[in-house]
Image: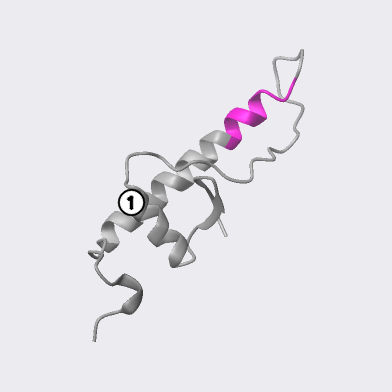
Amino acid sequence: MPDPDNAGTPAIPDETLKRALHAFKKRLKLTKLDQESKLGVNRPMTSGKKSDVMGIIPPNDFPRAVWAELARTKQLKDMGGGFYSLP
């Protein structure tokens, strides 16, 4: 019996979802590191303050359907406005 939640949409391969999640985590990590390196105002080194990045727009290497599927399966949290975060 077909899944009513996926009616009319082709299944996304697990390998694609896995690669997309890996790319998301890498982008989130780099975004946090980038923000932390800019926290020191007049100092060449950061003040040690942690980043307050809550979510990011996922890499455009994958279609929106991939991100929606990861959110549906609770591997990502949809924050609205195209932003996603880790649950």
**Split into 4 quadrants, where in the image is the N terminus?**
bottom left
Which of the two residues, 3 or 46, is positioned nearer the viewer here? 3
Check the image and report above or below for 7 versus 50: below
Residue farthest toward the front in the current orientation of the protein? 8
Check the image and report above or below for 57 versus 64: above
Q: Which residues are magenta?
A: 32-40
**Split into 4 quadrants, where in the image is the C terminus?**
bottom right
Which quadrant would residue 42 be assigned to in this image? top right
Q: Is residue 87 magenta?
A: no
Which of the two residues, 2 or 39, is positioned nearer the viewer here? 2
Query: SS at mark 1?
Result: helix
Q: Is residue 33 left or right of residue 63?
A: right
Residue 39 picture location, percent across and down? 72, 25
Q: Is residue 35 magenta?
A: yes
Check the image and report above or below for 77 versus 55: below
Q: How is the image coloured?
A: one colour
Q: Is residue 51 left or right of residue 19?
A: right
In the image, what residue occupies the spot 25% across and 81% down? 2
Q: Is residue 6 left or right of residue 79?
A: left
Residue 43 picture location, percent across and down? 75, 15
In the image, what residue occupies the spot 44% across and 67% down? 73
Residue 65 picture location, percent across and down? 34, 54
Q: Residues within 10 Å of mark 1 (few under 14, many from 20)?
A: few
Q: Which amino acid, by three-letter code, is at mark 1?
A: Arg
Give the dominant element type of the magenta stretch: helix, strand or loop: helix
**Which residue carries the number 1 mark?**
19
